[in-house]
Image (cartoon, helix red, strand yellow):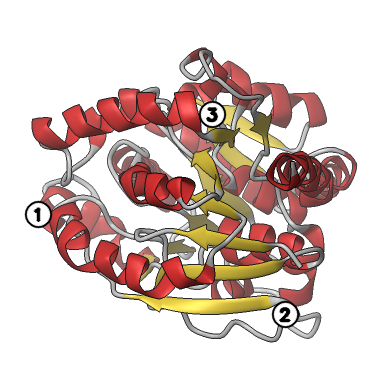
C-alpha cells in the first residue's frame, strides 16, 4: 500500500479534522502514519499508525526540538505523500520532497489576515519567514484549502488544488450521542472553539447579563482554549455577575465535549469581522446543526447564507449584546420553533454540509497525486 504521512507540530492529538476525519478516510485506502504532538491511541483504525511528537507552545522551541524529532522518526518511513497542516513545516516538507515524496500543503487559515490577532509567535521575523516559505509552497507543493474564501489569496498555484471543507462528520457525532442523557432542567448553551475577545466573548458576557434579568438560572458550557488574559475578562463590567453561569473546560476532546451539547438550547458561534473570519466558515456551526442545535452566530453574509437559507438559527451582530440576549431568550421561549430549527439544520448537514461529500473530494485528490507519484 502507498504510504501517507500526516504531520503537524501544532494540532492537538484529538484534533477533529485530522484525527477523526482525514486520517480515517485515507486509512481506508492507504497506509497512514499520523504524527502529532503527544499522540495517543484513539481507537483501532486499520492501516493507521500514530507517531508521538513533543509538544511546545512557542515556535522557536518547536524548531529546535520538535522538528528534529519529526525528521528522526519520519524520514525512515519513506512516505509517498506528506500532508502538512501548518506552514512552519514547509522547510521539512522540502526534505521529504527531495527524497521523492509529493507534498500536500493544507491551508486552514489566511495568516496574511490573522497575524495581527495572534498573541504569540507573531514576531516580524516569523512573519517574514512565513511569507517566504508560503510562496515557495505555492510553487512546489499541492495545496488543499479548507474554505472557498482562501482562493482569493491562494490564486497563483503551480498545481491543481482542492477545497476540502471542514464540514461535520455525521456518523462520528452520532456515535457520541447518549440517548439516555436526561434533558436539562434549566436553559443550557453550548460553545465550542477558541474563546477570545475577537470571538465576541465580551459581547457574550454583556448579553448574558441582560438575559439574567429575565432568566436567573441558566448554564453556558464553554469548551476551548482561552486566548485572553484573565484580567481582561475580569475587567468586563458584567463578568462577575454572569461568572456563576459559565463553566470553562479548556480544550477538550470532542468525544467528551459533545456530551454537554445534548439537548442544549442552542449552540453559540459568535465572531467579530476581523482577520479572515467573515470569509471563512467556523466549523462549529455545522457541528451544531448536525447535533440538532439551533445556531446563534454572526450576521456575516457568508453565515447568513447557511443559517437563514435553512432557517436553522439566528444571525446577530457580534457587537450587539441586546440582540444576542434577545436571540437567546427567543430560543428559550419558543420550544417548538427551536426544535424545528434543529431538525432543519440536521437535514441541511445530511444533504450538503457533511464530511462524506468532502471525503470524496479528498480521496479523489489523493488518487490523482498517486498517479503522479507512480509515473
Residue 14 in picture, x, y percent from top left: 51, 70
Please state which of the two labelled residues, at mark 3 or mark 2, is closer to the viewer.
Answer: 2
Residue pictured at 90% horizontal, 41% vertical: 351
- Depth order, front residue of 115/303: 115
Q: Secondary structure at mark 2?
A: loop
Q: Nearer the viewer, mark 1 or mark 2?
A: 2
Q: SS for tag 1?
A: helix
Using the numbered discs, state the Cα–Cα distance from disc 3 to disc 2 in whole angstroms.
31 Å
Residue 325, compared with residue 227, is above or below; it is above
Q: Give the secondary structure at mark 3.
A: loop
Name the front one of labels 3 and 1. Answer: 3
Residues under numbered marks 1 and 2 in contact, where contact means CB atoms less than 8 Å apart:
no
Q: Where residue 309 appears, x then y in whole percent? A: 78, 24
Earlier in the chain: of badge 1 and badge 2, it is 2
Q: Is residue 244 above or below residue 339?
A: below
Which residue has dot 1 on it? 231
Q: Which residue is mark 2?
A: 45
Residue on which disc 3 sits: 280
Q: Position of residue 106 (x, y in %)?
A: 52, 41
- C-alpha separation, residue under disc 3 versus residue under disc 1: 30 Å
* Residue appearing at x 47%, y 46% in the figure: 97
Q: Residues within 10 Å of mark 3 (few under 14, many from 20)?
A: many
Q: What's the residue at 25%, 31% (across, down)? A: 115
Q: Residue at x 31, y 36 (%)?
A: 198
* Residue 134 falls in image quadrant: top left
Q: Is residue 6 visible?
A: yes
In three-dimensional space, the C-alpha distance between marks 1 and 2, rounded to whole angstroms, equals 44 Å
Q: Of the residues under marks 3 and 2, which one precedes in the sequence?
A: 2
Q: Which mark is residue 241?
A: none
Q: Residues within 10 Å of mark 1 (few under 14, many from 20)?
A: few
Answer whether residue 317 is visible to the viewer in this image: no
> Residue 219: x, y in percent?
47, 65
Amino acid at each position: 500500500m502507498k504510504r501517507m504521512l500526516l504531520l503537524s507540530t501544532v494540532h492537538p492529538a484529538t484534533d477533529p479534522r485530522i484525527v477523526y476525519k482525514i486520517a480515517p478516510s485515507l486509512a481506508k485506502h492507504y497506509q497512514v502514519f499520523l504524527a502529532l504532538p503527544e499522540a495517543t491511541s484513539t481507537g483501532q483504525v486499520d492501516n493507521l499508525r500514530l507517531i508521538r511528537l513533543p509538544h511546545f507552545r512557542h515556535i522557536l522551541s518547536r524548531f529546535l526540538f520538535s522538528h528534529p524529532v519529526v525528521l528522526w522518526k519520519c524520514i525512515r518511513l519513506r512516505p509517498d505523500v506528506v500532508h502538512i497542516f501548518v506552514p512552519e513545516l514547509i522547510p521539512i516538507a522540502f526534505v521529504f520532497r527531495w527524497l521523492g515524496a509529493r507534498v500536500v500543503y493544507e491551508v486552514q487559515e489566511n495568516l496574511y489576515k490573522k497575524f495581527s490577532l495572534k498573541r504569540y509567535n507573531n514576531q516580524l521575523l516569523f512573519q517574514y519567514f512565513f511569507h517566504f516559505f508560503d510562496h515557495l509552497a505555492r510553487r512546489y507543493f499541492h495545496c488543499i484549502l479548507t474554505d472557498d474564501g482562501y482562493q482569493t489569496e491562494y490564486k497563483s498555484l503551480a498545481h491543481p488544488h482542492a477545497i476540502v471543507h471542514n464540514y461535520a462528520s455525521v456518523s462520528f457525532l452520532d456515535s457520541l450521542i447518549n440517548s439516555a442523557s436526561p434533558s436539562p432542567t434549566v436553559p443550557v448553551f453550548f460553545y465550542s472553539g477558541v474563546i477570545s475577545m475577537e470571538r465576541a466573548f465580551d459581547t457574550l458576557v454583556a448579553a448574558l447579563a441582560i438575559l439574567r434579568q429575565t432568566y436567573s438560572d441558566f448554564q453556558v458550557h464553554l469548551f476551548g482554549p482561552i486566548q485572553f488574559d484573565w484580567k481582561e475578562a475580569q475587567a468586563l463590567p458584567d463578568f462577575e455577575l454572569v461568572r456563576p453561569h459559565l463553566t470553562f473546560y479548556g480544550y477538550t476532546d470532542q468525544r467528551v465535549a459533545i456530551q454537554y451539547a445534548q439537548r442544549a438550547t442552542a449552540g453559540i458561534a459568535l465572531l467579530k469581522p476581523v482577520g479572515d473570519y467573515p470569509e471563512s466558515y467556523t466549523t462549529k456551526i455545522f457541528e451544531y446543526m448536525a447535533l440538532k442545535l439551533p445556531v446563534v452566530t454572526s450576521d456575516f453574509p457568508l453565515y447568513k447564507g447557511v443559517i437563514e437559507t435553512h432557517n436553522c438559527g439566528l444571525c446577530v451582530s457580534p457587537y450587539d449584546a441586546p440582540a444576542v440576549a434577545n436571540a437567546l431568550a427567543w430560543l428559550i421561549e419558543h420550544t417548538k420553533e427551536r426544535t424545528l430549527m434543529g431538525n432543519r439544520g440536521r437535514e441541511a448537514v445530511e444533504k450538503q454540509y457533511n464530511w462524506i461529500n468532502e471525503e470524496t473530494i479528498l480521496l479523489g485528490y489523493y488518487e490523482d497525486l498517486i498517479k503522479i507519484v507512480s509515473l
